[in-house]
Amino acid sequence: MTLSISRREIMGCSGGLAMGLAIGGLAGYQHTKGAAESIRFDDVLTKPELVRLIFNENPYGPPESAKQAISSAINASWMYGYKEVRLLREMIANHEGLRPDNVIVTEGSGELLKIAGLVLGGGKEVVCGYPTFTMLPDYAVRNGGTVEAVRLNSDMGIDLSAMEERISDLTGVVYVCNPNNPTGNSLNSDDLRGFIDFISPHVPVFVDEAYIDFTENPRLSSMVDQIKSGMNVIVSRTFSKAYGMAGLRIGYGLGRADVINRLEQRRISNPNRLGLIAALASYEDQKFLSYSRKMVRAGIDVAYGVLNDMGLRYIPTQGNFILFDSGRPSVKFHRHMLKHNILVAPKTDFHENWVRVSIGRLEEMDIFAEAARQYFLKT
């Protein structure tokens, strides 16, 4: 069975999980010298047969449509991808019922997060949940901004009401990662739409939908309809996750034309042509997306199985990763997994006991499950 997490359990979790969540402001975003930083990842990543369950990569991609497109275009990779950027903007706009000037194509969604951190958060304040994906708030801080980090609620969800209370005249952007990383859960769509309706006339809302394609109903969960309604909301997407093309670095954003133009002016780099060609070939590949979702859900079920067997609490996920409480400092679990050639992510900025595990291929998840059982049965 799935173990739910109550307010009482949170307050009593290994010295108080709530204390880990209550870290606010910039302090919550400074990288601690914890377990993850004690590992030399350059050395670890060169290990043969390493099972990579750390970066939320999707090993079922790229789609065959993308592979064939890259193969056909490789001899022309001496060209820049200016034409392909235009074509991808047009394709995305047509698919979403928007105009091309509502679309920005970037080198992964990470570039867009950095641009938004610079343009909207630089010298201003970013309001966001905590913990969450920190690229946008981190980049704002590096450019003179500050962060108002709002702890998650008792259900481990982003607390929109508490975030609303933290918005001030200093706020430059509100950042919402949905589904959230590292927790994997998502907001009620109607609640988020209501929040955007109220907030966006005053402050832009940036909704990071990197994992939206793993949700049960991606189109219903997405906030693109708010853009069509004229709301000042930016939605970011990526080909890195459900499409399995993290190494090809293609992402995009959707928003009002005036906002997209502001972001375009501070572009950091240009996407590579082969990545663009792969994105064009696979963007509407619904057969692959269905397959990708099916296989990721199967891998999640394997992880749920071992976590339930071991009596460990975890957060039911809508992403391609799971956050769970190992019951003891996560660095110990991390080191045990490394001995079995498995790399996972200890979340020392969340709570020292919690671990995030990305979903790999089914055979990799079986390896993870066996190694996890060995660890918990022996300790």
Image (tube, helix red, strand yellow):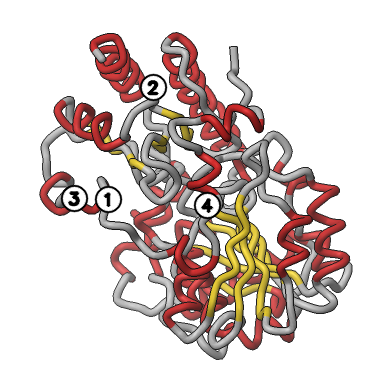
Q: Are marks 2 and 3 in contact (CB under 8 Å)?
A: no
- What SS does tag 3 mark? helix
**Quadrant of the snapshot with the N terminus:** top right
Residue wearing tag 4: 131
Residue 268 versus residue 127 in the image, above or below: below
Residue 93 versus residue 349 in the image, above or below: below
Q: Nearer the viewer, residue 301 or 186?
A: 186
Of circles 4 and 2, which is in front? 4
Query: Please, what is the three-letter code of the amino acid marked with disc 4?
Result: Pro
- What SS does tag 1 mark? loop
x, y percent for residue 340: 17, 25
Q: Are marks 1 and 2 in contact (CB under 8 Å)?
A: no
Residue 262 versus residue 15 in the image, above or below: below
Q: Do the residues labelled 1 and 3 touch (CB within 8 Å)?
A: yes
Residue wearing tag 2: 362
- What SS does tag 2 mark? helix
- What SS does tag 4 mark? loop
Residue wearing tag 3: 38
x, y percent for residue 6: 65, 28
**Quadrant of the snapshot with the C terminus:** top left
Query: Please, what is the three-letter code of the amino acid marked with disc 2?
Result: Leu
